[in-house]
Image (spheres, rainbow, N blue to C red):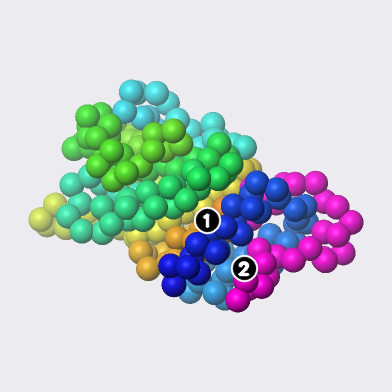
Amino acid sequence: MKLARLLIFAVLLATVVAPTPMAAHSLDSLEQDLHEKEKFFEIKNVPAPDFTLQDADDNSVSLSDLRGKIVVLHFVYASCPDVCPLHADVIARIQEMVNQTPMRDQVQVVTVTTDPERDTAEVLRGYGEAHGLDPANWVFLTSGPDRPEATRELVEAFGHGFTVTEDGLQMHGVVTHVIDQQGTLRGNFHGLEFDPTNLVVYLNGLVNAGAPHGDEAAQGTIPSIWQRILSLF
Protein backbone atom coordinates (compact mmCIF):
# COMPACT_ATOMS: atom_id res chain seq x y z
CA MET A 1 0.00 0.00 0.00
CA LYS A 2 2.81 2.41 0.80
CA LEU A 3 4.48 1.61 -2.54
CA ALA A 4 1.19 2.22 -4.35
CA ARG A 5 0.86 5.63 -2.70
CA LEU A 6 4.42 6.52 -3.71
CA LEU A 7 3.71 5.53 -7.31
CA ILE A 8 0.52 7.59 -7.34
CA PHE A 9 2.35 10.60 -5.95
CA ALA A 10 5.15 10.18 -8.52
CA VAL A 11 2.60 10.35 -11.33
CA LEU A 12 0.99 13.35 -9.69
CA LEU A 13 4.30 15.15 -9.37
CA ALA A 14 5.20 14.48 -13.01
CA THR A 15 1.79 15.72 -14.11
CA VAL A 16 2.18 18.99 -12.23
CA VAL A 17 5.76 19.58 -13.33
CA ALA A 18 4.96 18.96 -16.99
CA PRO A 19 1.17 19.29 -17.29
CA THR A 20 -0.55 17.99 -20.38
CA PRO A 21 -3.30 20.16 -21.88
CA MET A 22 -6.73 19.39 -20.43
CA ALA A 23 -10.08 20.41 -21.85
CA ALA A 24 -12.98 21.32 -19.58
CA HIS A 25 -14.51 17.89 -20.10
CA SER A 26 -11.32 16.33 -18.70
CA LEU A 27 -12.00 17.94 -15.31
CA ASP A 28 -15.60 16.77 -15.47
CA SER A 29 -14.33 13.27 -16.18
CA LEU A 30 -11.91 13.47 -13.28
CA GLU A 31 -14.73 14.54 -10.97
CA GLN A 32 -16.90 11.65 -12.10
CA ASP A 33 -14.04 9.18 -11.70
CA LEU A 34 -13.28 10.55 -8.26
CA HIS A 35 -16.95 10.40 -7.30
CA GLU A 36 -16.90 6.70 -8.12
CA LYS A 37 -13.58 5.95 -6.41
CA GLU A 38 -13.89 8.13 -3.31
CA LYS A 39 -17.17 7.57 -1.48
CA PHE A 40 -16.61 10.61 0.74
CA PHE A 41 -16.34 13.03 -2.21
CA GLU A 42 -19.31 15.19 -3.21
CA ILE A 43 -19.46 17.25 -6.41
CA LYS A 44 -20.90 20.72 -5.79
CA ASN A 45 -20.04 23.20 -8.58
CA VAL A 46 -21.86 26.19 -7.03
CA PRO A 47 -20.63 29.69 -6.10
CA ALA A 48 -18.79 29.55 -2.76
CA PRO A 49 -20.11 31.86 -0.03
CA ASP A 50 -17.87 34.91 0.15
CA PHE A 51 -16.50 36.12 3.47
CA THR A 52 -14.31 38.81 4.96
CA LEU A 53 -12.44 37.72 8.09
CA GLN A 54 -9.14 38.54 9.76
CA ASP A 55 -5.91 36.71 10.46
CA ALA A 56 -3.84 36.68 13.66
CA ASP A 57 -2.31 40.04 12.75
CA ASP A 58 -5.71 41.69 12.12
CA ASN A 59 -5.19 41.67 8.37
CA SER A 60 -8.44 41.46 6.44
CA VAL A 61 -8.80 38.38 4.22
CA SER A 62 -11.71 37.84 1.84
CA LEU A 63 -12.40 34.82 -0.31
CA SER A 64 -12.45 37.20 -3.26
CA ASP A 65 -8.85 38.18 -2.37
CA LEU A 66 -7.84 34.59 -3.11
CA ARG A 67 -9.15 34.49 -6.69
CA GLY A 68 -6.63 32.85 -8.96
CA LYS A 69 -5.76 30.27 -6.30
CA ILE A 70 -7.41 27.02 -5.32
CA VAL A 71 -8.64 27.21 -1.74
CA VAL A 72 -8.81 24.24 0.62
CA LEU A 73 -11.04 25.38 3.49
CA HIS A 74 -12.24 23.81 6.71
CA PHE A 75 -13.75 24.82 10.06
CA VAL A 76 -12.36 24.01 13.53
CA TYR A 77 -12.05 25.50 16.99
CA ALA A 78 -8.81 25.23 18.92
CA SER A 79 -10.23 23.83 22.17
CA CYS A 80 -12.08 21.02 20.37
CA PRO A 81 -11.15 17.75 22.13
CA ASP A 82 -11.77 15.27 19.35
CA VAL A 83 -12.38 15.65 15.60
CA CYS A 84 -11.00 19.15 15.00
CA PRO A 85 -7.35 18.32 15.78
CA LEU A 86 -7.64 15.16 13.70
CA HIS A 87 -9.05 17.20 10.83
CA ALA A 88 -6.20 19.70 11.10
CA ASP A 89 -3.70 16.84 10.95
CA VAL A 90 -5.31 15.53 7.74
CA ILE A 91 -5.18 19.01 6.23
CA ALA A 92 -1.49 19.23 7.18
CA ARG A 93 -0.78 15.95 5.35
CA ILE A 94 -2.54 17.26 2.27
CA GLN A 95 -0.60 20.51 2.43
CA GLU A 96 2.68 18.64 2.80
CA MET A 97 1.96 16.67 -0.36
CA VAL A 98 0.92 19.81 -2.25
CA ASN A 99 4.00 21.72 -1.13
CA GLN A 100 6.31 19.09 -2.60
CA THR A 101 5.03 20.10 -6.05
CA PRO A 102 4.80 23.37 -8.03
CA MET A 103 1.19 23.57 -6.83
CA ARG A 104 2.56 25.15 -3.65
CA ASP A 105 2.08 28.66 -5.06
CA GLN A 106 -1.34 27.90 -6.51
CA VAL A 107 -3.08 26.39 -3.47
CA GLN A 108 -4.11 28.30 -0.34
CA VAL A 109 -5.17 26.42 2.80
CA VAL A 110 -7.68 28.29 4.97
CA THR A 111 -8.77 27.31 8.48
CA VAL A 112 -11.71 29.20 10.00
CA THR A 113 -12.47 29.15 13.72
CA THR A 114 -16.01 28.71 14.98
CA ASP A 115 -14.96 29.98 18.42
CA PRO A 116 -13.77 33.59 17.91
CA GLU A 117 -14.22 34.44 21.61
CA ARG A 118 -11.57 31.98 22.79
CA ASP A 119 -9.45 31.61 19.67
CA THR A 120 -7.37 34.73 20.21
CA ALA A 121 -4.53 35.95 18.00
CA GLU A 122 -2.06 34.03 20.16
CA VAL A 123 -4.09 30.84 19.75
CA LEU A 124 -4.33 31.36 16.00
CA ARG A 125 -0.56 31.79 15.71
CA GLY A 126 0.21 28.65 17.69
CA TYR A 127 -2.28 26.32 16.03
CA GLY A 128 -0.39 25.85 12.78
CA GLU A 129 2.88 24.92 14.43
CA ALA A 130 1.09 22.48 16.72
CA HIS A 131 -0.41 20.64 13.74
CA GLY A 132 2.41 20.94 11.22
CA LEU A 133 0.71 23.50 8.96
CA ASP A 134 3.04 25.62 6.84
CA PRO A 135 2.29 29.38 7.04
CA ALA A 136 3.69 29.79 3.51
CA ASN A 137 0.25 28.93 2.14
CA TRP A 138 -1.94 28.45 5.21
CA VAL A 139 -3.89 30.97 7.28
CA PHE A 140 -6.16 30.69 10.33
CA LEU A 141 -9.03 33.19 10.18
CA THR A 142 -11.48 34.58 12.72
CA SER A 143 -14.32 37.06 12.75
CA GLY A 144 -13.04 38.48 16.05
CA PRO A 145 -14.72 38.17 19.47
CA ASP A 146 -17.16 41.00 18.75
CA ARG A 147 -19.02 39.09 16.04
CA PRO A 148 -18.74 35.36 16.75
CA GLU A 149 -21.90 34.70 14.77
CA ALA A 150 -20.08 35.55 11.51
CA THR A 151 -18.04 32.35 11.28
CA ARG A 152 -20.88 30.25 12.65
CA GLU A 153 -23.20 31.56 9.96
CA LEU A 154 -20.44 30.85 7.44
CA VAL A 155 -20.39 27.20 8.50
CA GLU A 156 -24.09 27.00 7.70
CA ALA A 157 -23.62 28.89 4.43
CA PHE A 158 -21.19 26.14 3.39
CA GLY A 159 -23.93 23.60 3.96
CA HIS A 160 -23.59 22.09 7.41
CA GLY A 161 -25.21 22.81 10.74
CA PHE A 162 -23.78 24.41 13.85
CA THR A 163 -24.92 23.93 17.45
CA VAL A 164 -23.41 24.56 20.88
CA THR A 165 -24.04 21.85 23.47
CA GLU A 166 -24.76 22.45 27.15
CA ASP A 167 -21.17 21.61 28.07
CA GLY A 168 -19.80 24.19 25.63
CA LEU A 169 -18.80 21.83 22.83
CA GLN A 170 -19.49 22.95 19.29
CA MET A 171 -21.08 20.52 16.88
CA HIS A 172 -20.62 21.08 13.17
CA GLY A 173 -19.92 19.04 10.06
CA VAL A 174 -16.42 17.77 9.35
CA VAL A 175 -15.96 18.76 5.74
CA THR A 176 -12.99 19.79 3.59
CA HIS A 177 -14.17 22.26 0.97
CA VAL A 178 -12.35 22.75 -2.34
CA ILE A 179 -12.89 26.11 -4.09
CA ASP A 180 -11.48 26.77 -7.54
CA GLN A 181 -9.64 29.78 -8.94
CA GLN A 182 -12.89 31.52 -9.90
CA GLY A 183 -14.49 31.19 -6.46
CA THR A 184 -16.65 28.16 -7.30
CA LEU A 185 -17.15 25.53 -4.63
CA ARG A 186 -16.19 22.53 -6.74
CA GLY A 187 -16.43 19.74 -4.19
CA ASN A 188 -16.57 18.56 -0.59
CA PHE A 189 -14.63 15.76 1.07
CA HIS A 190 -16.69 14.59 4.03
CA GLY A 191 -15.37 13.32 7.34
CA LEU A 192 -11.86 12.09 8.04
CA GLU A 193 -11.74 8.77 6.20
CA PHE A 194 -11.21 10.00 2.65
CA ASP A 195 -7.84 9.32 1.03
CA PRO A 196 -5.77 12.55 1.10
CA THR A 197 -4.09 11.46 -2.14
CA ASN A 198 -7.46 11.64 -3.89
CA LEU A 199 -7.89 15.23 -2.79
CA VAL A 200 -4.39 16.15 -4.00
CA VAL A 201 -5.07 14.50 -7.37
CA TYR A 202 -8.24 16.61 -7.55
CA LEU A 203 -6.27 19.79 -6.81
CA ASN A 204 -3.89 18.85 -9.59
CA GLY A 205 -6.83 18.49 -11.97
CA LEU A 206 -8.09 21.94 -11.04
CA VAL A 207 -4.62 23.46 -11.51
CA ASN A 208 -4.25 21.92 -14.95
CA ALA A 209 -7.82 22.65 -16.04
CA GLY A 210 -6.78 26.11 -17.16
CA ALA A 211 -3.92 24.90 -19.38
CA PRO A 212 -4.15 25.60 -23.15
CA HIS A 213 -6.23 23.06 -25.03
CA GLY A 214 -4.34 21.14 -27.69
CA ASP A 215 -5.62 18.94 -30.49
CA GLU A 216 -5.11 15.80 -28.42
CA ALA A 217 -7.16 17.20 -25.56
CA ALA A 218 -9.93 18.24 -27.96
CA GLN A 219 -10.00 14.71 -29.34
CA GLY A 220 -9.92 13.17 -25.86
CA THR A 221 -6.79 11.16 -26.63
CA ILE A 222 -4.67 12.33 -23.67
CA PRO A 223 -4.88 9.74 -20.88
CA SER A 224 -6.43 10.92 -17.65
CA ILE A 225 -4.53 11.04 -14.36
CA TRP A 226 -6.39 7.93 -13.23
CA GLN A 227 -5.47 6.11 -16.47
CA ARG A 228 -1.80 6.95 -15.92
CA ILE A 229 -1.99 5.70 -12.34
CA LEU A 230 -3.74 2.46 -13.36
CA SER A 231 -1.12 1.85 -16.06
CA LEU A 232 1.46 1.35 -13.29
CA PHE A 233 -0.21 -1.84 -12.09
Q: Residues within 10 Å of mark 1 (few under 14, many from 20)?
A: some
Residue 105 locus on image (x, y percent)? 55, 36
- Amino acid type at image mark 1: Val
Query: Which is nearer the N-term, disc 1 or disc 2?
Result: 1
The quadrant the C terminus occupies is bottom right
Position of 31 relative to 166 (above/below): below
Q: Residue at x 14, y 52 (%)?
A: 168
Asked if the residues shown at circle 1 and circle 2 are in contact, with their CB atoms under 8 angstroms apart, the answer is no
Element type at marker 1? Answer: helix
Q: Could you give the CA–CA distance between mark 1 and mark 2, rounded to whole angstroms? A: 14 Å
Q: Residue at x 48, y 74 (%)?
A: 39
Q: Residue at x 49, y 43 (%)?
A: 99
The residue to which callout 2 is attached is 229
Residue 113 locus on image (x, y percent)? 30, 43
The residue to which callout 1 is attached is 200
- In the image, which residues are magenta? 205-233
Position of 24 relative to 113 (above/below): below
